[in-house]
Image (tube, rainbow, N blue to C red):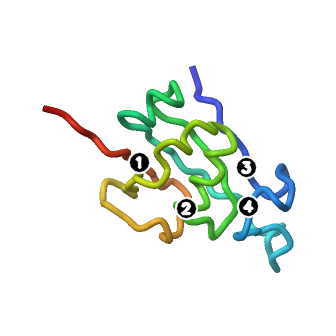
Amino acid sequence: MEKETQDFSAENCPGEFFGEHNLVGVAGMNSEPSVKIEVLFFAKAREITGLPDISLQVPPSSSAGDCLKILLTKFPRLEEICNSIVFALNEEYAPDSIILKNGDELAIIPPISGG
C-alpha cells in the first residue's frame, strides 16, 4: 500500500500559512517543483500524531522550522513539545534553520526521559 503524501506547496496553501516565512509570491516559486521529504516521529511526537512517519511536499527553500510550522497546522497538539524538539536530518542532528532538499528524511525528536 502506497503512503499518502501531504502536499503543503504554495499552490495548495494560503499565503499566511507560512507565517513570517511566507514563501508565496517569491520570485520563481511557481516554476520550482515542491520538495518531497519524509518526516519521522519519535516518542511523544509519535504519540501525539498517531503516526510513525509521514511524507510531505513543501515549498523549495523550506527549513526544518518551516516544516514544523506546517506540521503544527496538521497536528496542533505538537505545540505541547515544540519548544523542546530536536531535529535530525538524514540521521544527523541539525538546527531548525537547515534547508530541506528533495528526498530528505527529517526526524522530529522530543525530549526522552526514563529511569
What residue do we see at 44% from left, 31% from top?
Answer: 46
Mark drawn on residue 107 = 1
Q: Nearer the viewer, residue 55 or 88?
A: 88
Q: Which residue is mark 2?
A: 65
At label 1, which amino acid type do we have? Ala
What residue do we see at 51% from left, 53% from top?
Answer: 103
Which quarter of the figure is the C terminus placed in? top left
In percent of width and height, residue 20 lies at: 72, 70
At label 4, which amino acid type do we have? Phe
Of labels 4 and 3, earlier in sequence is 3
Q: Nearer the viewer, residue 72 or 54?
A: 72
Give neighbour class at mark 3: few <14, some 14-19, many 20+ (Cα, 10 Å): many
Q: CA distance from mark 1 to mark 3?
A: 18 Å
Mark drawn on residue 8 = 3
State if disc 3 and disc 1 touch (CB < 8 Å). no
Q: Is residue 64 above or below residue 61?
A: above
Q: How many marks?
A: 4
At label 2, which amino acid type do we have? Gly
Q: Is residue 59 above or below residue 98?
A: above
Mark drawn on residue 18 = 4
In percent of width and height, residue 25 lies at: 86, 72
Q: Determine the secondary structure under disc 4.
A: helix
Which quarter of the figure is the N terminus placed in? top right
